[in-house]
Image: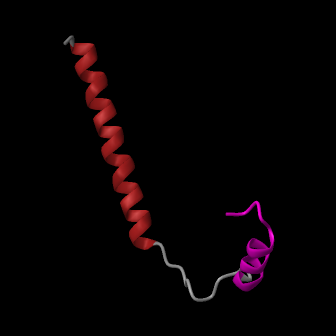
Amino acid sequence: MTAQQRQQQQQQQQFAQEFWEEQILAAEQFDSDFKNHPLPLARIKKVMKSDPEVK
C-alpha cells in the first residue's frame, strides 16, 4: 500500500468516524412527541383500508 493510499484510507476512516459521531449526537438530541402527531392517523387508516392498492 502506498503512502497516498494510506493517507486516503485514513481520511476516509476519519470522515466515517466524524459522520457517525454527528449522527449519534443528532439521534440523542432528537426530541419528538409521538403522541401528538401532526397527521390525522384515523383518516390515513381509513383511506388505506378503502384503497385495495395499499397493502
- Number of numbered discs present? 0
- At a point 72% along the width and 63% down the height, the residue shown is 54
Residue 2 % position (x, y): 21, 11
Determine the main secondary structure of the stretch shown in magenta: helix
Residue 42 % position (x, y): 72, 85
Query: Is residue 48 left or right of 4 when viewed as pictured?
Result: right
**Quick check: 13 above or below 47?**
above
Quadrant in which residue 26 is drawn: bottom left
Is 2 contained in the magenta span?
no
Residue 25 % position (x, y): 38, 64
Instruction: Name the outermost residue toward the left.
Output: 1
Query: Is residue 50 left or right of 20 when viewed as pictured?
Result: right
Residue range in magenta is 41-55
**Quick check: 32 above or below 25?**
below
- At a point 27% along the width and 16% down the height, the residue shown is 5
Split into 4 quadrants, where in the image is the N terminus?
top left
